[in-house]
């Protein structure tokens, strides 16, 4: 390998190459200071950009961009021994509740601060002050892309679930009766959520007529989305060779996800809500964490298959933090540019995600695949030969026995090992 051995050699994260290693890396004290800095910087910069003190909104977008670039650089360098020493905190097994840990944390954050300063200085020298708004528009566009990306990841991630449930080429359940059943089911799922989020889990008799109309309207939207999705995917679910029941399940799962995003957008409508509540902020934080984790997990899985260490272990953590800064910066930039609020920005994101998921639903269903081809490959249909009255299982056994005898003659192996091979072949 070309390079200095002390730098190119991996650190202590070399065993953290699988998805389980990613979860361990995210929970490691070695990167805790970086997560705390992410939360502190995101909140502080959002307040500054929202207030726009002295035109600091554009400057804040540049800082977010610099932080994103810095952590992407840290992610690339993290697999090396140098990156391990620069960006990870060694707690020596003593935990985080001691002064030496936090002193080491400050030293670990210093390279990040230097990188951010260099990137930020480069942006300021290359762009004039009045052109820094371009950075704000760039960061705002990331929010739109992430909303679309979230729709794609949730939709196509559900294909794996549907493919596992795909057993045989069965017809889809279509017709007015099934459409009504799915609609009633979807509405029933969201009734308790409306009572919890819409009515605050309180007495319905104490609510105003406007409140009742608002949330009954949402339940009507849930029913309408279910009917539209059912009719919109008729052709995709009736394709020849497809397991129609698996396609039906996939459609229902995605419809519920769409309606959940619509519920999130409905709750953030500025016509009904004046400011973001604590539960909304927690929900957005959880949503951001899940989105980032899914993105990093996907990168790590692909990197693990291809042997790319920069997407595994502690590198995945720094990629996730970089995505976190990009996500937070996109929300802050879009809010500042639109002169809106966190409510309107996140409501628009949820609405965009729901629309994209509904639009690509037929394409997702068509990606389930043909179960009959899988049966032929895995040997599931072999049992039908034994059940057929025209075919006796004795020739099958004789054929297997003769095959074992030929293997013994050719390879000189034991009969016991050959029978294990035959059993494995049949299974």
Image (tube, helix red, strand yellow):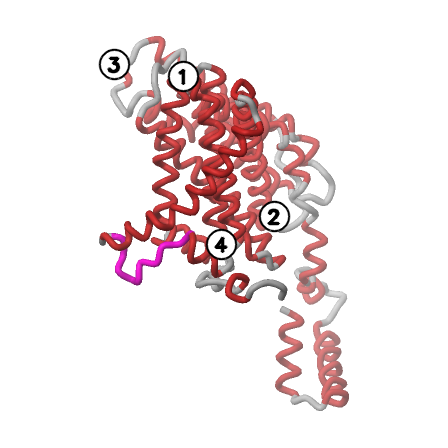
Q: Is residue 234 highlighted in magenta?
A: no
Task: Please tell me whether mark 2 sits on a helix, a strand or a loop.
Answer: helix
Task: Please provide the residue range marked out in magenta.
Answer: 87-96
Q: Earlier in the sequence, mark 4 or mark 3?
A: 4
Judge from the rendering whether residue 401 lies leftward or rightward of residue 318; answer left or right: right
- Most prominent secondary structure in the magenta stretch? loop
Mark 2 and mark 4 residues within 8 Å of each other at the beta carbon:
no
Residue hosting label 3: 206
Task: Please tell me whether mark 4 sits on a helix, a strand or a loop.
Answer: loop
Q: Earlier in the sequence, mark 2 or mark 3?
A: 2
Q: Nearer the viewer, mark 1 or mark 4?
A: 1
Residue hosting label 4: 78
Query: How far separated are the C-alphas under marks 2 and 4?
Result: 36 Å
Residue hosting label 2: 163
Mark 2 and mark 1 residues within 8 Å of each other at the beta carbon:
no
Q: Residue at x 62, y 79 (%)?
A: 420
State the image coordinates of residue 381 (x, y, percent, origin top left): 69, 60
């Amino acid at each position: 390998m070309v390079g200095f051995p002390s730098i190119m050699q991996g650190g202590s994260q070399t065993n953290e190459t699988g998805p389980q290693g990613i979860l361990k890396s995210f929970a490691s004290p070695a990167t805790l200071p970086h997560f705390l800095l992410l939360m502190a910087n995101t909140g502080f910069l959002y307040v500054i950009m929202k207030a726009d003190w002295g035109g600091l909104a554009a400057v804040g977008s540049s800082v977010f961009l610099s932080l994103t670039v810095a952590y992407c650089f840290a992610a690339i360098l993290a697999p090396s021994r140098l990156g391990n020493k620069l960006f990870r905190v060694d707690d020596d097994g003593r935990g985080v509740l001691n002064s030496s840990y936090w002193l080491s944390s400050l030293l670990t954050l210093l390279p990040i601060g230097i990188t951010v300063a260099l990137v930020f200085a480069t942006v300021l020298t290359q762009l004039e002050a009045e052109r820094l708004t371009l950075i704000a528009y760039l960061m705002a566009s990331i929010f739109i892309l992430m909303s679309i990306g979230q729709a794609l990841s949730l939709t196509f991630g559900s294909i794996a679930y549907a493919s596992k449930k795909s057993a045989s080429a069965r017809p889809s359940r279509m017709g007015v009766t099934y459409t009504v059943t799915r609609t009633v089911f979807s509405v029933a799922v969201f009734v308790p959520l409306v009572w919890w989020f819409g009515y605050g889990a309180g007495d319905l008799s104490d609510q105003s007529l406007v409140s009742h109309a608002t949330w009954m309207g949402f339940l009507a939207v849930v029913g309408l989305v279910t009917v539209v999705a059912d009719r919109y995917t008729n052709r995709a679910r009736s394709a020849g060779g497809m397991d129609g029941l698996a396609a039906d399940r996939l459609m229902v799962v995605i419809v519920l996800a769409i309606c959940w995003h619509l519920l999130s957008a409905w709750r953030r409508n500025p016509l009904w809500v004046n400011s973001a509540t604590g539960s909304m902020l927690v929900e957005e934080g959880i949503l951001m964490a899940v989105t980032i984790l899914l993105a990093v997990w996907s990168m790590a899985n692909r990197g693990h298959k291809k042997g790319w260490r920069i997407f595994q272990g502690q590198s995945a953590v720094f990629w996730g933090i970089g995505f976190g800064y990009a996500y937070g910066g996109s929300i802050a930039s879009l809010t500042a540019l639109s002169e809106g609020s966190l409510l309107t920005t996140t409501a628009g994101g949820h609405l965009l995600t729901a629309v994209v998921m509904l639009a690509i639903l037929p394409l997702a269903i068509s990606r389930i695949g043909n179960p009959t081809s899988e049966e032929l490959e895995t040997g599931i249909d072999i049992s039908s030969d034994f059940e057929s009255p025209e075919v006796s299982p004795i020739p099958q056994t004789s054929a297997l026995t003769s095959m074992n005898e030929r293997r013994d003659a050719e390879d000189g192996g034991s009969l016991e090992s050959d029978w294990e091979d035959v059993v494995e072949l049949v299974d």
